[in-house]
Amino acid sequence: MASVAQGIPAFASPLNWFREFLREELAPYPGRGAVVVRMVVAATIVMIINMTFRIPYGAYGAIYALTISRENPQATVNAVKTIVVAFAISVLYVLVGAMLFLYDPTLRLFWIIGTFFVMFYALRAMSNYTAAARFGYLLIITIPLWDQHVSAKFRVENTLWAFGAISLASVITAVVEVVFGRLKPQDDLIQSIAERLAGVQELLDCYSQDRPADSGTSKRLTNLAMVGTSRLRSVLQRSGHCSKFRRHVHHISKA
């Protein structure tokens, strides 16, 4: 029992655990610097435009510019198309709901309850999670606006401004992605696979020379094992490789 008790590692203090957590999460990997640069450029451009023209809900647009997926430019452009359409549907839903239920507090309460039910049900049931999430995102922003004691004109204008500010941020982010993609074309899927194969090669080289793996190789493989392949599967599904593969299989099956 004593040997078993001695073999149990001591728990790390919360401060040490948090330091290690930040070190692991902020560890650099190939392409991370370029992603950060694109995010900063997109958010900066959005805020410059918002501050110059004093666009309402500009802060939501700047924050939203940091949340759009960036596997590759084509995936970002497709995501932006879905986002803008979802925002437009959300705006129409809010305006129609305001026209029908705004001036009756009881109906307004039931409409809000039903709206949140529809929003969360869409998040659960829809296959396109991005569209459902963006639909609910604009609802969360604009519903409190219609409960303020202000004029109807002010409510409508600010609802449209919310749609315009966030949609503009999405379009600007897509443009930044396309520009950076043209300046430095790359394939995140191939690059990620090459990174994993390079780490395995380094490990096998160490074993072939009868020496233990160095700390850098071990840490890199540990990080890759923790990340897993979920990001690669997401990149594959959102890239053009999956459709090309399906078309190739379809042609083979027909032949």
Image (cartoon, grey):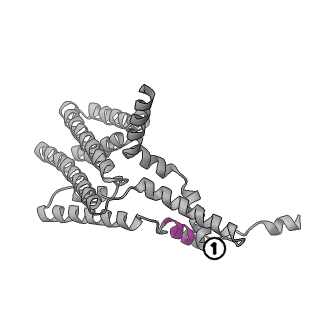
Picture layout, residue 83 above or below residue 223? above
Q: Is residue 108 visible?
A: yes
**Residue 127 visible in image:** no
Q: Nearer the viewer, residue 228 or 254?
A: 254
Position in image of residue 104 (x %, y %):
23, 32
Residue at left offset 54%, top offset 59%? 197
Which of the 4 quarters of the picture holds residue 253? top left
Q: Residues within 10 Å of mark 1 (few under 14, many from 20)?
A: few
Asked if residue 24 is among those painted magenta in the image, a careful observer would answer yes
Location of residue 194 in the rendering, given as x and y in whole percent from the top left corner: 49, 59
Residue farthest front in this picture: 255
Number of numbered markers: 1
**Residue at x 24% of width, y 37% of height:** 89
Magenta segment, which residues? 19-25
Look at the picture and state if 60 lies above or below 250. Answer: below
Q: Which quadrant of the figure has residue 128?
A: top left
Residue at left offset 41%, top offset 36% = 248
Is 176 left, or right, of 224 in this rendering?
left
Quadrant placement of the N terminus: bottom right
Q: Where is residue 178 drawn, in percent x and y?
A: 26, 56
Residue in the foreground of this view, choosing between 244 and 22: 244
- The type of residue carrying mark 1 is Asp
Which residue lies under the disc numbered 1?
214
Please name whichever residue, 239 or 164, is drawn nearer the observer in this view of the structure. 239
In the rendered image, residue 74 lying in the magenta stretch gets the answer no
Q: Please, which residue is most extreme toward the right here?
A: 1
Q: Is 74 left, or right, of 167 in this rendering? A: right
Identify the secondary structure beneath mark 1: loop
